[in-house]
Structures are given as structure tokens and as C-alpha cells.
Image: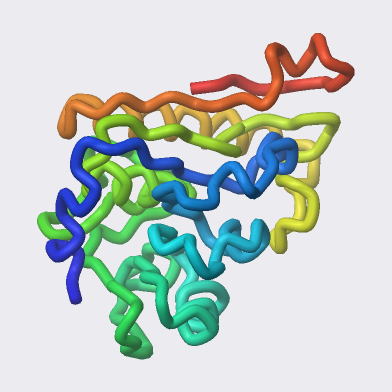
Amino acid sequence: MNLDALKDRHKGQEIYVLGSGPTLGYFDPYMFVGKIVVATNRVAERLGLYRPGNPWVYTHTHYHDEDAYPLAEENPRYLFITPEGEQGYAGQPTRELGNVIHYPHRPTTFDFDPEAKWALPGGLVVGSTSIHGSMHLAAHLGAATIWLVGADCGTLDGATNHEGYQSGNLAGSNHLEWLQRWDGHLVAVANRLRADYRVGIHSLSPFVNPNLEGHKWEGTRI
């Protein structure tokens, strides 16, 4: 199977795109059961979404050996989508599994330019974080509306990822610079997808306002 086989599979429907941001931990995972979900990296595993009666969970990741291959072997009923090169760099897949789709792409780095480094035909955009490809996959699946969950590009009570996420939290004095860079990239990718696919893209928040409900938020929202 290649990416073309998924074109407009869920045309006109709502699709939830899940990132690893700290607000994700304030959603009840049951909210996503029975929904069409594109999860980033190991988020679906962390939320327990690979389960009977929950067929439409897709996982997009830049990490072959860490995420795509082991998860695909453990969850053969689900599809895992990943670039040909590990972490978006140039290269070829090291393994072939029936439920893993590899797609062609331009090599990219953290210093991502969404115009100069946009997707190749038959592929997805490989941006500075895996969620860019998750968003593109949802648009490719035919979404009329994409709901971003945990696409935070900021800190909540000092945390940059939801509790238990395997990559932990950003550290160091420049972590806010990284978040600001990713936030700019996220907005640019969303705007390109809106224009190319005529899709609505909105970010969900579990709070009316994070700073008014006992939490401290630093960052921006799409």
C-alpha cells in the first residue's frame, strides 16, 4: 500500500490530530474512541487508542526504529505512516512491513522552510516536528475539519509534553526559542494546508483560558 491508497478515505469528515503537548493530558482519552484520529509518534499508544472498536487510528512518525516498526508489529490492524528517511533525512526504509507506509520527501532539518521544503508528489511534508506530517496526512485523508489536540508549542505549569510522554520535556535556557520556532512552523504549515486543501484547522483547548483556571501558560495557539 502507498499513500495514494489513503486519498480522501475520510472525505468531508472531522479528524483529530494528536500531538504530545501538555494540554493533551487534560483530555479524557475516551473522547477519541470511535473518532478518526491521526496520532503523532507514540501518542496513541500512551492514550490506549489501539483497541477493539476503534478502527480509524493512524499514526504518523518520523522515527522508524523507535516508533513505526515496533508499534506496527504490536498493532497489525493499524496503519503507520513514516517518511522514507529516518527523521526526515535522506535515506531508504530499513524494513518493509505490510501496515507501514513509507512516503517520498525532501530531506529537512529543524530549520524548516514550509515553502522551499514542501512535500514531494505522493508524499507528505516533513517539517521540524512530526505533527506537521500528521496534519498533512489528515488533509490527505479528506478532512473537512482538523481538530488539533496537544499541538501546544508552549509550556503548561512548566511542562512541554504531557505526563508520561516518552521524550520527556525540553530543558535548557533556550527551550522557549525552540517552542517559538515550532509555533511559527506550525502556523505556516496550517496555512498552507488550508489553502491547498480548503480544510478548516482549529486547535482545541481543555480550558476556557489556561491562566484563569489555576494553570500557568506560556506560548501561543494556532
Q: Is residue 42 above or below residue 91?
A: above
Q: Is residue 89 above or below residue 196?
A: below
Q: Could you say which is closer to the camera, residue 61 or residue 74?
A: 74
- Classify residue 41 as left or right of residue 106: right
Image coordinates of residue 131 in percent, x first then y, are: 46, 47
Q: Could you say which is closer to the camera, residue 87 or residue 146?
A: 146
* Residue name at image x 67 percent, y 30 percent: 154
Q: Residue furthest top?
A: 212
Residue 11 showing in the rendered view: yes
Image coordinates of residue 177 in percent, x first then y, are: 64, 32
Residue 59 showing in the rendered view: no
Q: Which quarter of the figure has residue 31?
A: top right
- Classify residue 103 as left or right of residue 169: left
- Classify residue 172 as left or right of residue 154: right
Q: Which quarter of the figure has residue 192?
A: top left
Image coordinates of residue 128 in percent, x first then y, are: 45, 47
Q: Which quarter of the figure has residue 23?
A: top right
Which corner quadrant holds the N terminus?
A: bottom left
Q: Is residue 151 above or below residue 221?
A: below
Q: Could you say which is closer to the camera, residue 57 or residue 118?
A: 57
* Residue name at image x 38 percent, y 63 percent: 88
Image coordinates of residue 85 in percent, x first then y, are: 34, 72
* Residue name at image x 34 percent, y 53 percent: 126
Q: Could you say which is closer to the camera, residue 53 or residue 105?
A: 53
* Residue name at image x 52 percent, y 30 percent: 183
Label tally: 0
